[in-house]
Amino acid sequence: MILSSYAHRALLACFCVVLSFGTVGCKGCSKGKADKAKAAASAKASGGPKLRVPVKLRLTEAQQKAASALAGKAKGGSFPTKVVKNRANAPLFLYLAASSDDPKIIAASLKAMASAFASADSKRGANRAGREYAKVVAAHLKSKDPAVVAAAIRASRRALAGKRPPNALVGQLVALAERDPQIGTRIEALQALRQVSHFQRRKDADSALLAALKHESPALQSTGLSLAAFRKARELRDKPAFLEQARALMKSPDPGVRGRAAVLAAYLGRYQAEVYEEVAAMLEDEHPCARSYAVTAFSRFSQPGAIHRLIKLVDDMAVDQYDTKYKSAAGKDAAVHHNHKQTTVHDRVISALTQLSSQLDAKFEPAPPGKEDAETSRKANAAAAKAWYAKNKAKLPKDEPPKKPEKSQKDDQGGKADQGKKAPKGAQAAGKAAPRQVAPPAAPQP
């Protein structure tokens, strides 16, 4: 068969291309195999496994060997305290968490990271919980191992503490707090989210917190109530929904839950007579923990007239601590702590009297609590409080809910947050300022 000149040239070109590809391909394969062998030999020599979490982490060969030796020191899911306190080990913990396939080593490394690293905004230049730190934590929040998830939640607090916490990491924790099947995981995720500045302003905060309040677990309810009441609940978006849930939880069989619910209700329903009376009724609760929270809640109304009722509990020396138990994310026994072993209902009353009387001309000034003999100092303060009340009773305002200021733009249930709204253009043009929000005086958190 005779081929045309054009066909002959085309056939010759195809043959050259195939021959060239085969030659280059063989060289490429040989080079690729050599590179892999070299990398494997290097990893074997340095003791450094391949990173399972894609992060930008550069360690010297000596550091990789040190990390490999460090992994052998993890016992029972934790590293020795001396090892954790050594700042030079911080990048090694991050490396192990990103490269190890052993859940125990990963959990131990994450726990160590929580102690060895500083927050992203820390003035301490080295070992800050930056972007790569957050990537490693985020990857392990998806783990199927409960101990690894628990350690990742613990480590997340360092990454969340900065001014600009990673939004994706916050979103992961919100999802865990709202939907995880394990109660312990949801509780610990909420506790970690407390580190997020202005968390309540987030659009997904309401759903996570309300889900906690509506759940049947007292420990989860109590944790949600505590976070919802943070910063006096000013930044909650759907305040009416939270007030409704808080009032419902004031009837909870758990004294810690109903006590914290009273505090949240007092913040959100400050100008509602019904809420005022519901909180006042809890002053007679059978459990000291609930009575103690009721005293704190009553002081949140910032109404000096409340002293008429609070003075009746000044001799209540019952310890107000109460623990609501649950299983942690790692499956261990844990508890939500309400108040402390050393505090009593009397202590809360004295604090409330001091705060409320600060609005009056005649201020109550208790003696500092005695460290050696607390019982004696408490009795002395109780007697002083009763004497002060007897002297100033006639001067105190009536026992009634505070009246809503005329300039307040909030509705009776708090309304939705209107922070950041600008004054109307007309008012700005006229040089008028927007009405000033009237807020209650600052008070310590329970």
Image (spheres, rainbow, N blue to C red):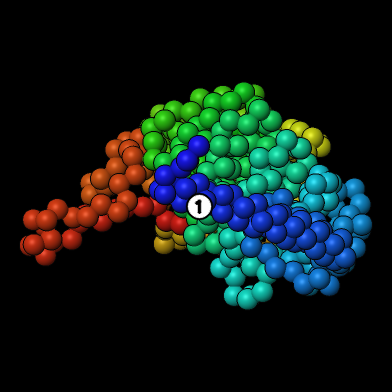
Query: Is residue 221 toward the left or the right of residue 78 in the image?
Result: left
Above or below for 215 versus 426: above
**How many numbered marks are there?**
1
Does dot 1 land on a helix, a strand or a loop? helix
Which residue is more in the foreground, 95 or 27?
A: 27
Identify the residue at horizontal 26%, vertical 56% (top origin): 436
Tell me residue 342's x, y (percent).
75, 51
Q: Which residue is drawn at 83% across and 51% down?
A: 105
Q: Position of residue 221 (x, y in %)?
A: 60, 32
x 70%, y 54%: residue: 26
Q: Picture coordinates of residue 327 (x, y %)? A: 76, 33
Q: Is residue 434 left or right of residue 387?
A: left
- Judged left or right of residue 228, residue 21 is right
**Residue that extends furthest to the front in the rendered view of this protein:** 2
Quarter of the image for residue 182 reads top right
Residue 321: % across, % down: 72, 42
Q: Is residue 377 visible?
A: no
Is 379 in front, or is 4?
4
Confirm whether residue 139 shows in the render.
yes
| 101 shown above or below 67 | above
Disc 1: CA contacts within 10 A as few (<14), some (14-19) or many (>=20): few
Please report the residue visible at 32 percent of the width from the left and 51 percent of the height from the top.
419
Which kind of residue does numbered mark 1 sit on? Ala
Q: Is residue 271 above or below residue 405?
A: above
For disc 1, the marked residue is 13
Q: In which quarter of the image is residue 249?
A: top right
The quadrant where residue 372 appears: bottom right
